[in-house]
Amino acid sequence: MKDLRVSQNATRSNALLSPREGAAVVDHSERRLLRLTGKDPVGMLNAVLTNDVPAQEDRGAYAMLLNPKGRIQTDLRVTRAGKDILIATEPEGAQAAREVLGRYAPFSRVKLEDLSDSYSVLGLYGPHAGDLLGGPGLAEHQSREIEIEGLAVLSVGVSVPVSGYDLIGETETIDAVREHLISRGATPAGLDAYETARIEAGVPRFGADITPENFPGETGALDRAVSFEKGCYPGQETVARMHYRGHPNRTLYRLAVEEAEVMPGAEITQRERAVGTITSVAPLRAEDRTPALGYLSRNAIANEPLHSGDARVHVLGVVS
């Protein structure tokens, strides 16, 4: 289905997360963290992930773990912490990450630890986030240990849904850093603001827009999550075949819903037949419309009205 209308959301997304002072702190304690140590954790990851982990010691990557049929078991972010590797996942993908990486770790002489009960992630986003950290100037997935009021944390560059940094450390340290940043002028922002910015920017989330039923080519995340230059990994053949030879039966789109509320999982219809599904709905309404994400079948007809129940659904653009 062709894009019907594309809007620019970067400015609004930044405004949601930094409404007054130009930087906002977001508690990401829901994220799960694993640590890989040992002989060659990068080599192990490059054998199983859809994306390459760069050779530079301060660079990480966004990637997926697939089953042999090419379906997504979880997505994750790889971050360097000295010689160690940190893996961050959504809570819905944590078990799959532990199971899949745990199967490979012994053969690679790698130790896998779950840090979720003792470590946390704090987001600091917005145009002045770097100023509050002394200007680390990190690229996406680039990491560096920094000190904030004598407290050591790992700072990781972030570009989506808005630019800024994720700070990783022991939970007590992260709590203290959060209070310090707020005292310096950062604005506390809840997950509702973050989710709205994420959905407006068209960034899919595992557990909502990505599930184990999806192939990477359906999600709009190929450019971010998949390398077509790397060696073999589980599910690679399916990913390559879909990318080079075929077209997915469904594709994730940025949407706007008007006139009525809808819930994730709601059916999208056209000419009284099902052509898709709503996967995410922004908690905060934007003017007279609510941002959303959802899958549309390749059989959906461009320029024909779409509905979800009593609500009119507008296509803003394909997720990419």
Image (cartoon, rainbow, N blue to C red):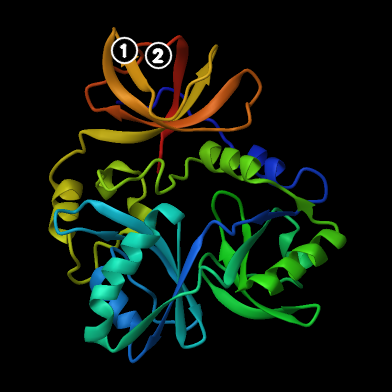
Residue 307, disc: 2
Q: Residue at x 54, y 56 (%)?
A: 30
User: Under tag 1, what secondary structure?
Assistant: strand
User: Under tag 2, what secondary structure?
Assistant: strand
Q: Is residue 216 left or right of residue 145?
A: left
**Position in image of residue 74 (x %, y %):** 34, 56
The vertical placement of 268 against 215, above or below, is above
**Position in image of residue 267 (x %, y %):** 35, 21
Q: CA distance from mark 2 to mark 1?
A: 7 Å
**Position in image of residue 52 (x %, y %):** 33, 70
Q: Residue at x 54, y 52 (%)?
A: 160
Please, what is the three-letter code of the amino acid marked with disc 1?
Gln
Query: Marks 1 and 2: in contact by CB < 8 Å?
Result: yes
Residue 288, disc: none
Answer with the quarter of the image where residue 34 lies: bottom left
Residue 270, disc: 1
Closer to the camera, 90 or 82? 90
Closer to the camera, 219 or 193? 193
Q: Residue at x 35, y 20 (%)?
A: 268
